[in-house]
Image (cartoon, helix red, strand yellow):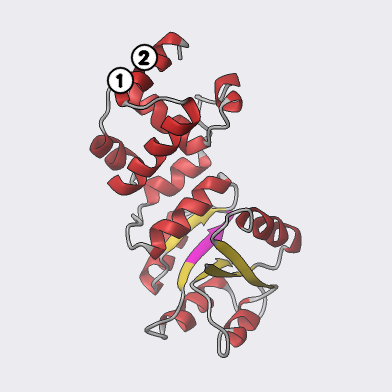
Amino acid sequence: MIRIAIADDHTLFAKGLASLLEEQDDFKVQQIFPNGQELVDYLKTATVEVVLTDLNMPVLDGFGVIEKLKKKKLGPKVVVLSMYDDEKMFKQCVKKGADAFLLKDSDPDEVVFTIHEVLEGRHVLNFDRVLRQANPSSFFDAFREKYKLSKRESEIIHLIKEGNMNKEIAEMLSLSIQTVETHRKNIHQKLQVNSRIELINKIHEMNL
């Protein structure tokens, strides 16, 4: 079980995020805190694997959270949640030791995959990836809704259609190859195909 703590002074957002995360069988949200100091104090006696922290908070902000938690060699992984696709903020978080940087309007699946990537040591910290979280894909349509495809899965299908292989897709999207392979596996399951050829044929059959 992956234990998670959230620090965010926007209560509705934090509770909504917690509900989404707890839909995953292997996630458990231990606590939600309105500021970074309460989170840090909690972790003096409690243990979690992942912390999701906002940047703008009272008492102790997200930058302070990163600094304090990264002083602990065996402390939790820190995933930053931000409303702003600001490269300066991103670089500052990376410099202080953040393990990932997500925008608050990211797809839920992006948050889930990022947590797994970070824990497995395969997350790619790249600002271009952050920017892509903010840019809606033109590949949203009835097809995506019908098959319950995520934003990232739709993007990967589009790149497969253009003839890109896993390694190329990973480079384009600033993902690890393992993450792309996991998305491909999920795509195959949702579209009920067993191979790349079947997937490409289905894409062409549906004139996507």
- The residue that appears at 63% across and 58% down in the rendered structure is 22
Q: How would you classify the magenta stretch by its main secondary structure? A: strand
Report the front residue among 131 and 148.
Answer: 148
Q: Residue 152: image x %, image y %? A: 46, 38
Q: CA distance from mark 1 to mark 2?
A: 6 Å
Q: Residue at x 42, y 31 (%)?
A: 188
Q: Is residue 87 left or right of residue 160?
A: right
In the structure shown, which secondary structural element does the residue marked by tag 1 occupy?
helix
- Rendered position, 85 above or below 155: below
* Residue 65 percent coordinates (x, y): 53, 77
Question: Does any portion of residue 87 appear in the rendered image?
Answer: yes
How many numbered marks does the figure carry? 2
Residue that mark 2 sits on: 201
Q: x%, y% of residue 35?
A: 66, 75
Q: Which mark is residue 197?
A: 1
Mark 1 touching mark 2, by CB under 8 A?
yes
Mark 1, Cα crowd under 10 Å, few <14 / some 14-19 / many 20+, is few
Q: Amino acid at mark 2?
A: Asn
Whether residue 195 sits left or right of residue 140 in the image: it is: left
What stretch of residues is rendered in magenta? 79-83
> Where 175 falls versus 186 (above or below)?
below
